[in-house]
Image: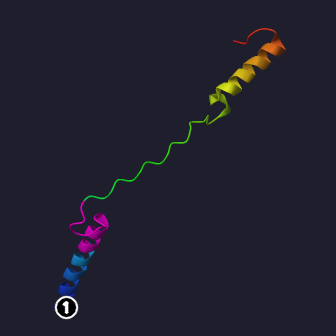
Amino acid sequence: MIVPVLLVVAVIVVVLILRATKNPGGLGSGPRPMRRPRPQRPARPLAPDDDPEFLRELERRARRDDGSKNA
């Protein structure tokens, strides 16, 4: 007789915990305030071949070594 009561109490506790985590402010707290977006860092090349300055330098060196533009 005690086991079914404990089972029902355990289920109720789990449901209440899930609701509390879903709505951390409790009942009637209203909508959560919006977070400020993080400031965007300037985009930077991820690899050398993404860097226009690096590519210009490679092209300049190739022309200097070769005397002609590599295709």
Q: Residue at x 55, y 42 (%)?
A: 41
The amino acid at mark 1 is: Ile
Q: Residue at x 51, y 42 (%)?
A: 40
Q: Quadrant of residue 14?
A: bottom left
The picture places residue 55, in percent across and down from the top left corner, at 69, 24
Q: Nearer the viewer, residue 4 or 47?
A: 47
| Mark 1: few/some/many CA within 10 Å (<14, 14-19, 20+) | few
Write down the region rendered in magenta: 15-30
Note whether 21 is above or below 58 in the view shown.
below
Residue drawn at point x = 35 percent, y = 53 percent: 34
- On screen, residue 3 versus residue 69, left or right, reads left
From this viewpoint, which residue is outermost toward the right? Answer: 65
Whole-percent x, y for residue 11 in the image: 23, 76
Q: Nearer the viewer, residue 64 or 5?
A: 64
**Image label count:** 1
Residue 11 is one of the magenta-drawn residues: no
Residue 22: % across, % down: 29, 64
Q: Is residue 49 left or right of residue 64?
A: left
Quadrant housing the C terminus: top right
- Quarter residue 61 falls in: top right
Q: Residue at the location (28% across, 70% down)? A: 20
Whether residue 47 is situated above or below residue 71 in the rendered picture: below
Q: Residue furthest left?
A: 1
**Which residue does the numbered mark 1 point to in the structure image?**
2
Q: Is residue 27 above or below residue 9?
A: above
Above or below — where is 35 with respect to 49? below
> The residue tagged with tag 1: helix, strand or loop?
helix
Query: Along the horizontal axis of the image, is 27 left or right of 42?
Result: left
